[in-house]
Amino acid sequence: MRDQGEPAAGSRTIDDKDSRMRRSKHMFELSGKKVYVAGHRGMVGSALVRRLASEDCTVLAPARSELDLKDQTSVRAWFERERPDAVFLAAAKVGGILANDTFPADFLYDNLMIEANIIEAAHRTAVGKLMFLGSSCIYPKMAPQPIIEDTLLTGPLEPTNEWYAIAKIAGLKLAQAYRRQHGDDYISAMPTNLYGPGDNFDLKGSHVLPALIRKAHEAKLRGEHGLEIWGTGMPRREFLHVDDLADACVFLMKVYSEDEHINVGFGEDVMILEVAQMVMAAVGLEGDVRCDTTKPDGTPRKLMDARKLRALGWSPKTDLQQGIADAYRYFVQTGDQVRGMSVV
Ligand code: NDP
């Protein structure tokens, strides 16, 4: 794999003098500010609230019953009343392949409304800084790996979640458009696969890591040995602990002020087989990983290029084994309250 510091053949110079000058001109302080975390009960939003506790700022986190982000009138009234200085836009209708396939209108409409309402209300009330959160699904299905930021809109999307992806692309373009037309300091960050406290452990809808944690835990409770995984175990995936993501978002809120969105990744990927072995070690499940090769493998590799973020001086603190142990601790301690546990 290419070293993170080494430029890809033909790529542009990322950290040039002009961009450094633009950044230093736009340093944003959180100290003494009112900071609104939209989606504060979600996995990302709650990690942001935890991270912001160590900043000298006031976090605004209205209850869903108080503020439905699809409702433009309520959103405008809330912004007029509360006047946040900064906004992390981590509210979204999120779900897996099945949910996207079953509710395409909801995925497109809800996400378009949430982001349009918040961005416009932020502009009307002169919010000083806003970060829109997207995801790696904005990139073309066949994007060369590792995926660099300017692969956006260079090819067809993965059809299984295109409704969600189109809304996310519209969100980042909206942030960009308000910057261009009005000079608003709005930025967009695209996180890779996240895991950690607040994750969804529903076996039908969850991502690979929480699903493996739950399966390994339940296998251990049943006194079984070994863990079965789908496919050959050879596909490679990238994972970032949600507390590292929150730290990166706070970092970017302070130092990043550019038109283009920025990837937030771990910078390395790992084979699913190795992930399963790490999960077994964290859970204390003995035996081997069994690969059910009658099941499909999926995309061979999905890795975001994280050089742009690294060049700004941020890197993750939680290695995968340590992060999996943390996610498992959360899973055990939270018990029945874990998301997705009622669905078997
Ligand atoms: P969650 O589903 O955990 O959280 C989403 C939050 O949005 C929830 O708190 C939910 O509120 C809130 N929300 C949804 N609709 C509304 C609404 N109409 N009004 C008010 N609040 C609403 O998602 P994540 O935290 O995982 O994701 C957050 C962002 O991060 C998304 O944009 C996602 O694309 C991005 N991301 C996530 C990744 C991941 O692996 N989890 C990977 C890459 C990007 P309530 O709790 O009341 O339902």
Image (cartoon, rainbow, N blue to C red):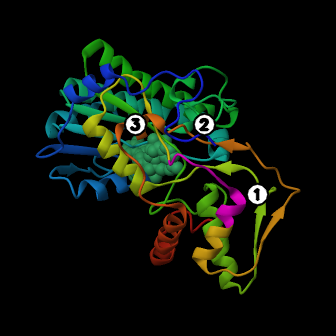
The amino acid marked with disc number 1 is: Gly
Residue denoted by label 1 = 233
Where are the magenta residues, as a range?
Answer: 266-276
Judged by depth in the image, the label closer to the viewer, 3 or 2, is 3
As helix, strand or loop, the secondary structure at mark 2 comes to loop
Please check the rendered image and state whether residue 63 is part of the magenta-colored stretch, yes or no. no
The amino acid marked with disc number 2 is: Pro
Q: Pick the quarter of the image with the N terminus.
A: top right
Sequence-earlier tag: 3 or 2: 2
Task: Report the Cα–Cα distance between label 3 and label 2.
Answer: 16 Å
Judged by depth in the image, the label closer to the viewer, 3 or 1, is 3
Asked if residue 308 is positioned above or below residue 334 in the image, the reply reads: above
Question: What x and y, as percent, mark residue 164?
Answer: 56, 35
Q: Which mark is residue 146?
A: 2
Q: Pick the quarter of the image with the C terminus.
A: bottom right
Residue 70 visible within the image = no
As helix, strand or loop, the secondary structure at mark 3 comes to helix
